[in-house]
Image (cartoon, grey):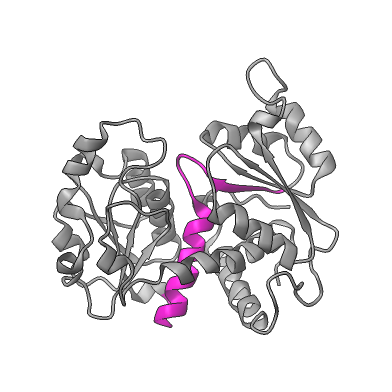
């Protein structure tokens, strides 16, 4: 049994094994319909319990399809439907019940501590479907997508992030260390990655490149990542923040500073951080990126269940 909580805690060898397995599984599914089960039904009889404390579209649907295609099933819960919470059932007791009924637990939460507490008390694999400091399933799938499109190991590419520092960027930074790729980050000074993340990179004898000028950040980029500047639960002055990111909007003029054959990726949902022209243009591969979540999450599930090839 293995948890999948943060890319920092998983070896580069295991992360690469997940990607290789996902590549094989995607190829083998070309002639199968959506709910046809993979050959051998490797997770037949297994059930994944999912719990969402935050809104979800891609993570919810992709994990549903992932476990189904592996021969298992899923049960989706909302925390407000459980006894979990203030004055209710403890995380320890909830974890014991989940471990009794389920074979794996995926949580999307607004609390890193909650994930930590669950990991201590669960006797089944725990998967982080998103937390304030990490979105590991998204970013590992993104690595898969980059290599699929570019047909190169990501270590040979220049990766750029334009936008706010958030959980997706934190996982991308972790990935840059694990997969040894150059990562340039473009954001206003006050929105740079936090000290803890930067120290972790330094302690691992790696480096990230931070620019407060978006043109410098995107210069020579093979791949451009972005995310919403205003997230769903962002408790800030939204007008002020949008104004501070005005010059960081990814439009035709800015993307001209990247390589001609660069690709644009966005974890969705989108906001006004990217122009319609770029989002729907020739550089964008956001729909392929979203679909690949299914294939990579299948291999993440197999990793967690100890069934990875």
Residue at point 74%, 58% (across, down): 305
Q: Is residue 141 magenta?
A: yes
Q: Position of residue 286 (x, y in %)?
A: 42, 67
- Quadrant of the rendering where the C terminus is positioned: bottom right
Front position in the image: 193 or 61: 61
Q: Is residue 185 magenta?
A: no
Would residue 124 be seen by someone viewing this image from the given angle?
A: yes
Q: In the shown orientation, is residue 171 left or right of residue 74?
A: left
Residue at point 42%, 46% (across, down): 167
Q: Position of residue 298 (x, y in %)?
A: 66, 64
From this viewpoint, which residue is outermost toward the top?
Answer: 87
Q: Position of residue 308 (x, y in %)?
A: 70, 67
Hey, which quadrant is residue 234 in on the image?
Answer: top left
Hey, which quadrant is residue 235 in on the image?
Answer: top left
Residue at point 71%, 48% (across, down): 125
Relative to 12, residue 228 above or below: above
Would residue 303 be seen by someone viewing this image from the given angle?
A: no
Q: Which residues are magenta?
A: 125-153
Front position in the image: 277 or 185: 277
Q: Position of residue 72 (x, y in %)?
A: 79, 60
Q: In the shown orientation, is residue 198 left or right of residue 136?
A: left
Q: In the shown orientation, is residue 207 left or right of residue 64?
A: left
The number of callouts visible is: 0
Residue at point 53%, 43% (across, down): 55
Q: In the shown orientation, is residue 37 left or right of residue 21?
A: right
């Amino acid at each position: 049994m293995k948890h999948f909580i943060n890319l920092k805690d998983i070896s580069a060898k295991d992360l690469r094994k997940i990607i290789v397995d996902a590549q094989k599984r995607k190829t083998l599914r070309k002639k199968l319909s959506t709910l046809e089960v993979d050959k051998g039904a490797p997770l037949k009889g297994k059930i994944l319990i999912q719990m969402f404390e935050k809104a979800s579209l891609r993570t919810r649907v992709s994990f549903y399809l992932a476990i189904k295609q592996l021969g298992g099933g899923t049960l989706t819960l909302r925390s407000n439907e459980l006894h979990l919470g203030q004055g209710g059932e403890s995380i320890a007791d909830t974890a014991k019940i989940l471990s009794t009924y389920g074979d794996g637990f995926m949580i999307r939460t607004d609390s890193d501590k909650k994930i930590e507490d669950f990991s201590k008390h669960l006797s089944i694999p725990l998967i982080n479907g998103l937390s304030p400091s990490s979105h590991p399933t998204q970013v590992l799938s993104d690595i898969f997508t980059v290599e699929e499109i570019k047909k190169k190991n990501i270590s040979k590419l220049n990766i750029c992030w334009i936008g706010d520092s958030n959980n997706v960027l934190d996982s991308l930074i972790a990935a840059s260390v694990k997969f040894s790729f150059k990562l340039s980050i473009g954001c206003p000074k006050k929105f740079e990655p936090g000290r803890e993340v930067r120290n972790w990179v330094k302690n691992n004898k790696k480096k990230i490149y931070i620019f407060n000028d978006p043109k410098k950040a995107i210069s020579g980029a093979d791949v451009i990542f972005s995310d919403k500047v205003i997230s769903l639960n962002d408790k800030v002055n939204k007008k002020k923040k949008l104004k501070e990111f005005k010059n960081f909007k990814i439009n035709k003029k800015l993307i001209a500073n990247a390589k001609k054959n660069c690709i644009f990726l966005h974890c969705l949902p989108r906001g006004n951080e990217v122009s319609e022209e770029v989002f729907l243009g020739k550089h964008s591969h956001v729909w392929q990126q979203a679909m690949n979540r299914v294939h990579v999450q299948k291999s993440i599930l197999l990793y967690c269940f100890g069934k990875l090839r």
